[in-house]
Image: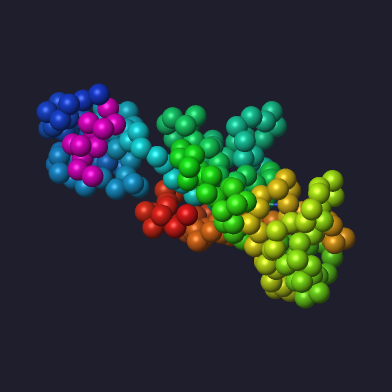
Amino acid sequence: MRLDKFICESSSLTRSLAKKALHRGEVTCDGIVVKDSGFKVEACHHICLAGEPLSLIGPRFIMLNKPVDYICSTQDEVHPSVLNLLGLERRDELHIAGRLDVDTTGLVLITSDGQWSHKITSPKKECGKRYLVTLADPIDESLIAPFQQGIALRNEEGLTKPASLTIIDSHTARLVITEGKYHQVKRMFAAVGNKVVGLHREAVGHIELDETLTSGQWRYLTEEEIQSV
Ligand code: URA
């Protein structure tokens, strides 16, 4: 989108006032003054007007590499929320599309678009979530069939939906589930007498955690990633 249009759609300025502000050098992109009203604004750009950040009212789509000791809800007296890591304006418009436990790391998707997140979290949509799981006790191929057939979780009726398990080594596996029951991965392994000691989400649907994001870093999703859901 052109910079003058971006300013109009994210502030109260008219097109002509936006052009004047540009001319006066009041607009910066990633800290650098931009005077060209035709400058093309990308989702990753940080635009400020007179030092105040501007962002479009439209939906936002973010991936975060969650560290341990952050929570995926807004309120907790002990741990900070992952939303604190974003440092974004209008944080109250954002929600998390599929929470992770405080000790789980990896891919968290954050958005302001409720319909989009519903496609990720609704079990009916069968959106796969892939986890790298580290176990306390040895595992082997004999678990693949029961996980595929469904596991009876404690205090829960029925079986889990088919889950795809790949054994990596004696204590590590990849698991893809399409539901998001409370502590589901930990409870599935507990149901077969094992204990999860490390849990990392690598992918949600076709969205893979960007390997260039270190723990605690985030970026906006690409158009292709957004449309893949
Ligand atoms: N399953 C769990 O047990 N914990 C998570 O954080 C995610 C899936």
Q: Is residue 8 left or right of residue 166?
A: left
Q: Is residue 144 above or below residue 188?
A: below
Give the image quarter of residue 131: bottom right
Is residue 56 located in the magenta-colored stretch of the structure?
no
* Residue drawn at point x = 44 percent, y = 58 percent: 228
Q: Nearer the viewer, residue 131 or 31?
A: 131
- The picture places residue 98, in percent across and down from the top left corner, at 60, 46
Q: Is residue 86 visible?
A: no
* Residue drawn at point x = 23 percent, y = 44 percent: 1
Q: Is residue 17 left or right of residue 66?
A: left
* Residue drawn at point x = 53 percent, y = 59 percent: 205
Give the residues in magenta.
Answer: 1-11
Q: Is residue 44 left or right of residue 67?
A: left
Q: Is residue 22 visible?
A: yes
- The picture places residue 165, in percent across and down from the top left corner, at 70, 68
- The picture places residue 177, in percent across and down from the top left corner, at 66, 59
Magenta region, main secondary structure: helix
Give the image quarter of residue 36: top left
